[in-house]
Amino acid sequence: MATPKELRYSEEHEWVKTEGDKLRIGITDFAQSELGDIVFVELPSVGDEVTADEPFGSVESVKTVSELYAPVSGKVVEVNEELDDSPEFVNESPYEKAWMIVVEPSDASQVDSLMSAEEYDEMTKED
Amino acid sequence: MSELKRTPLFDVYKEYGAKTIDFGGWELPVQFTSIKEEHEAVRTKAGLFDVSHMGEIRVEGEDALSFLQQMLTNDLSNLQPNQAIYTVMCNEKGGTIDDLIVYMLADQDYLLVVNAGNTDKDFEWLKRHQSGRVQVSNVSEEWAQLAIQGPLAESILQELSKETDLSEIKFFKFHPRVKLGNVYALVSRTGYTGEDGFEIYVESKEAPALWKAILDAGKEEGLLPCGLGARDTLRFEAGLPLYGQELTEDISPLEAGLGFAVKLKKDSFIGAEALRAQKEKGVPRKLIGLEMIDRGIPRHGYPVFADGKEIGQVTTGTQSPTLKKSIGLALVEAAFAVPGQELVVEIRGKQLAAKAVKSPFYKRSK
């Protein structure tokens, strides 16, 4: 299972990538592998506010629906609309093609409380 | 929580990378590689399923036929040895206790193959109504069941069968003793996927060797081990009901579109009066297909609306791997069960547009 070192991770299996003052968010390789074939992704719209630890959208596999939990609070400034037609990107390329939203965080220091790749690997190993 | 039950194949399919889940108290594989891949293999090549969790109940004795005629909705009077029939078992209200396949092994000797989660309930129901010279026994532990399904199922299984020509086993017929490699099995041309294929009944201890032999035989043709996930999407596309979703003790076989398995003209059976009344007055609810117009996936239990009022619920729904569409089955008030009817499905608080369509969604071309 891939866990890129440069990203930060939430307990709900989202990754966060810092890009200047913005944060790009998606779900981890571990999460997509647990969920199986993703067939549907529901995301917020540009301009929506997301709140840390609350749902901002959902992903559906053939069998189940799973909520996506925002790792940080902030305003959505970009949404990956390609996932509407190509939800399989989540399985194929969770860290690249399947980024989900870009957020302008209300407080940039929120990222510091997220896990490192090592900590995330440790957590998922115990699952 | 009590420990999950395992089939005789548990240790073997773990080797094949099975991801297991709790399915009605059984630890069963939901997938091996991917539900979509396994689904695709069954539609275009072949897939092998472990369905050993299914229950088997044997009914024998001089009065076995008259007893079963009383218990089941279909008419077994013309059934011959080595033939199978799909039927429903109802309660007095016409609700569905279970749907099952009856195999006629010999005169006065029948094997009922029932849903895993209903085995104990069915057995007790049969025992409670037992009358005449009949012996009812739960033989589920003795049997393992494999299903090989898909257009290449016959040619793959034929490689293991040197003595029996499998093409001679027609739909809903079986051969009681086919030698597959070194193992003897009951082989029937039945299934739960909408494809051609066989269900194979063997003694539990023979199952692991047979599983491996079949997978080896089909390796080059693209045979894949398949889990319950694909089994569910396959049966759903083919419009085959799943007990607990399309069928419950509150849903009659007529409402679920199983009228072909309900013979009201035969001598009376449990539930016949209620079903006759439903037929005369018209069923209150009907199972329909629905297709989403707005983006969203209907799921079991989601409410369905028409003309501004709730008219029923989704029984099964998913993104169809074969049709690449978001579709569902729903049990709705009969007046709205018309193809083209505009519907609304409430998906996690959102009212999304859908329309009624014909089911089954998929029929194999032949």
Image (cartoon, rainbow, N blue to C red):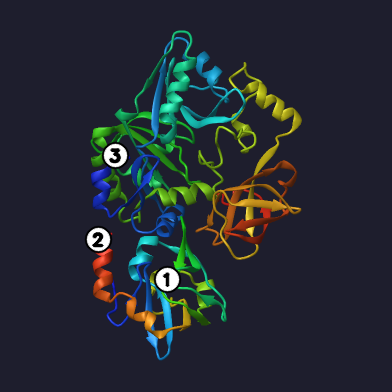
User: Circle 2 sits in a helix, a strand or a loop, which is it?
Assistant: helix
- Say if B299 sits above or below B112 in the image: below
Give left or right: position of B21 versus B63: left
User: Circle 1 sits in a helix, a strand or a loop, which is it?
Assistant: helix
Residue A97 on image: x %, y %: 42, 78
Which dot marks residue B156?
none
Q: Mark yes or no: residue B104 visible.
A: no
Q: Residue at x 23, y 41 (%)?
A: B209
Which dot marks residue A90?
1
- Say if B61 sits above or below A59 in the image: above
* Residue type, numbered disc 1: Val
Asked where in the image residue B142 lies, by quadrant, the reply is: top left
Which dot marks residue B3?
3
Give left or right: position of A93 versus B67: left
Q: Residues within 10 Å of mark 3 (few under 14, many from 20)?
A: few
> Mark 3 — on which chain does it sit?
B
Residue A14 on image: x %, y %: 39, 72
Q: Nearer the viewer, mark 3 or mark 1?
A: 3
Residue nearer the viewer, A68 or A32: A68
Residue B30 on image: x %, y %: 37, 51
